[in-house]
Amino acid sequence: MVEQTLVLIKPDATEKEVWLQIIDRYRDAGFFIKKTKLVGKMNRATAKKLYSAHRQKPFFDRLINFTTSGPIIALLIEGEYCITSIRKFNGSTDPEKAKSGTIRAEFGTRRGEKHENAVHSSDSPESAQAEITLFFNS
């Protein structure tokens, strides 16, 4: 089944200037990057929409502050079952638990701050559609 998903390269990865290496990893793994967009600094309203599922969690404010702290790059990726494939390729959201060779194991920043893990990706077809709209249809 062909799907589309959103990947955001987060401020920790853009600050370290590893964003091109991350894009190359997706391409080298055979993922089709249909669109890219330099978003710059995400505004707080968009970040709150993106992470609305975490609104009641204790880390929500730190996540929003981090996400809006620097430039991000949005990727629209398309392919067979790419939502699940990309999430596996990215690794655990906690870089310390991510398997070697995954994006988050290789490029995640501060150990102990799980949200500083280099990338965000959609977790379901429904969230992918909403997230893609936030960045590519606005």
Image (tube, helix red, strand yellow):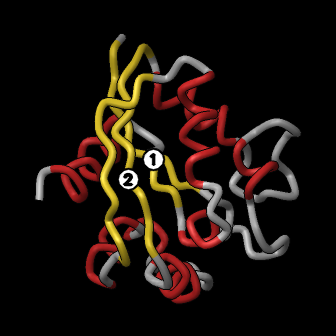
Give the quarter of the image for residue 107.
bottom right
Give the quarter of the image for residue 12.
bottom right
| Residue 11: percent from left, percent from top | 55, 71
| Residue 72: percent from left, percent from top | 44, 65
| Residue 50: percent from left, percent from top | 36, 65
Q: Of residues 112 and 126, which is closer to you in this image?
A: 112
Give the quarter of the image for residue 5.
top left
| Residue 13: percent from left, percent from top | 62, 63
Residue found 58% across the figure and 35% down from its top: 24
Q: Which residue is mark 2?
A: 74
114 left or right of 101? Answer: left
Q: Secondary structure at mark 1?
A: strand
137 left or right of 48? Answer: left
Q: Amino acid at mark 2?
A: Ala
Q: Residues within 10 Å of mark 1 (few under 14, many from 20)?
A: many
- Asked if residue 107 is positioned above or below residue 68 in the image, the reply reads above
Residue found 82% across the figure and 36% down from its top: 101
124 left or right of 132? Answer: right
- Asked if residue 135 is positioned above or below residue 68 in the image, the reply reads above
Q: Residue lying farthest left?
A: 138
Residue found 45% across the figure and 47% down from its top: 7
Tags 2 and 1 in contact by the CB under 8 Å rule? yes
Spatial CA distance of label 2 from label 1 is 6 Å
Q: Amino acid at mark 1?
A: Val
Q: Which mark is residue 26?
A: none
Q: Which residue is mark 1?
A: 7
Mark 2 or mark 1: whose residue is earlier in sequence: 1
Q: Of residues 14 and 89, which is closer to you in this image?
A: 14
Q: Of residues 18 and 100, which is closer to you in this image?
A: 18
